[in-house]
Image: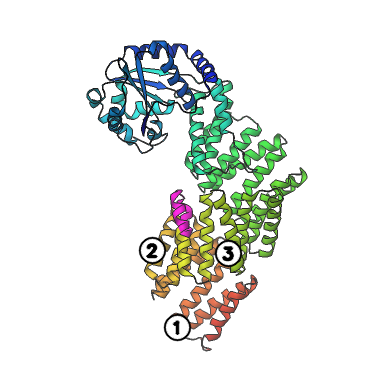
Amino acid sequence: MNSSKKQSNLPSQGNLNVEIGQFIAANQQEFAELLTFVDFAETFTLGLVEVNFPPDAELLIEALKTSPECRDIQFVILNLSEPNLRFIRDEIIKLLPSIEREPDKKLVLIVRGLEQSIGVFGEYPPVLQDLNFVRDAYKRTVPHPILFILPDYAITRLAKFAPDFWAWKSGIFRFHTTQATKDYAIAQTANAENDRGMIQLATPEEQERIDLLHRLLMDYKPTGHQATGDNLRQCSNILHQLGVAYLNQKNPEKAKDYLAEAVKLLNGEESAFHAEVLNSLGEAYDQQREFDKAIDCYQKSLRISQKLENRRGETDSLFYLGNAYLEMRQFQQARDFYQQCLEIEQQIGDRYSCASTYHQLGWVAQEMREYEQARAYYQQALDIYLEFGDRYSCAGTYHNLGIVAEEMREYEQARAYYQQALDIYLEFGDRYSCASTYNNLGYVAQEMREYEQARAYYQQALDIKLEFGDRYRSANTYHNLGIVAQEMREYEQARAYYQQALDIKLEFGARYNQGKTYHNLGIVAQEMREYEQARAYYQQALDIYLEFGDRYSCAKTYHGLGLLAEAQEDYAEARANLQKALEIYVEFKDEYWAGVAREVLERLPDNCEN
């Protein structure tokens, strides 16, 4: 926070005079009324000035300072842009003694930046609570006229959450944005989207962009007004960009609000833009794991693109449909959509977009334990990314190649792939994506029995997920921290981590993913000789795997039930469960676990009667 009389981001003097002239020409009446206000204002007098964009605010301040009508006024700008600011009056009182007063001039304070602490969302921001509470003290402690320069949304929130202070305003002056400023803002918000509609920006850049989009939205659709005419399409476009920006910040709830409003404004029009907005709205539902709603959006988008014969639009919808079915573990359906997408991309010669589709086909093959096929698809994706010089996208494919190597127990190779992915994410400042790679580096360290290293990686992953508010994906890392504690025989700690993971999965309705946590809770209960509890957990895991048709995971739980029966000296039950596990391991060509199961079967007593 500081007191400043300096200009910032202003053009050269010649251009400055032209821009001031254009701004005042667009706001002649408002400027005349503001000049009258500052001329007559004495002692504490509050004026609220609505200006949606900082460059226009700077032009207005310069116009006031250079106006002949203000030659007897000293304007001092107080920059109070700290996001966590709470006590405005205290800050002003602190800055007043440092102001060098000009003789025979009236002091008028111009306060800027309060929109940062007022915010866009949320109830009763602390700064407005305090402003309302200490209203009466301003007359005594700040005996000067004050202009608060704020965008539309901040003034609306001030009126709502500080009504007593709002009642003291002596004037409100709403300045229009010049077309030049609008054009510049629109250009600044333009983003280089990748082929699937998601932009990749560092968090500070993205937050700055969101702020600019909010200001643009207020200009095309002021509070309490409806967008009409030419403003309708601009407003829809801004709402869409805001939605995509919040998707990038992993904030699907806010994204959904803006995208749904954009869809509403489009009012059923059949256009490529409408199809694109529906896909983005589907992604918001996808992030919230509301897959049925996501699929409905993607299907609507697909129908629009098919009617318009927009082949490129069709590929996007087919790709997103594949993603939704992949998340739902309906692998054959996902594969079918990806194959349709790939065929169209090849027909229209869109080689670059084929890369992301090959990547997803690799993911499907990986989930179906077709590891050589998965590796081949990932390599095709990687070759295309390298061909096009898309280093960032290589990271996701290196990561998934690491998963395949890990599943094939090639741990050093997996570690190398994960490290390549991590290096790229760090290079591009993509902190969020680092989380999944730290998580998988932790898993490799765990499999190599480097437990302290594994725990450190998992903690890094968890810290990032919590920082981004990604509660759902935190569950997987809590689960993995439980495995490390379990391997280190810290059973109470393991149980606590597993319970945290399970609570989140239950909260999000992620039934399939609950299976492995019930399974591991069974292992912990078994190690603590709580055999009935262990059996109950294993049975819950088995029920889920049978429900989802996941035969391979059933094998692990049959294996666990077999070891439990062995510990209870129920050898007939042990042999029956271990035999089921062995048959599935053989079916899936998992020689390692088949060997483990055979060893246990061989050590069971020949007489299996209790």
User: Residue at coordinates 53% horizontally, 32% vertically from top-left?
Assistant: 239
As drawn, is 86 to the left or to the right of 543? left
Q: Work out whether 538 lies above or below 305.
A: below
Q: Which one is earlier in the sequence, the residue at label 2 or at label 1?
A: 2
Q: Which one is earlier in the sequence, the residue at label 3 or at label 1?
A: 3
Which segment is the magenta one?
Answer: 460-477
Q: Which residue is mark 1?
A: 569
Say which quarter of the image contains residue 155.
top left
Whether residue 158 is in magenta: the answer is no
Q: Position of residue 76 (x, y in %)?
A: 36, 23
Q: Which residue is mark 3?
A: 415
Query: Is any part of residue 538 visible from this angle?
Result: yes
Element type at marker 1?
Answer: loop
Element type at marker 2?
Answer: helix
Q: Position of residue 7 (x, y in %)?
A: 45, 26
Mark 3 or mark 1, whichever is nearer to me: 3
Q: Position of residue 341 (x, y in %)?
A: 70, 47
Between 594 and 448, the one nearer to me in the picture = 448
- Mark 3 residue crowding within 10 angstroms, few (<14) / some (14–19) / many (20+): many
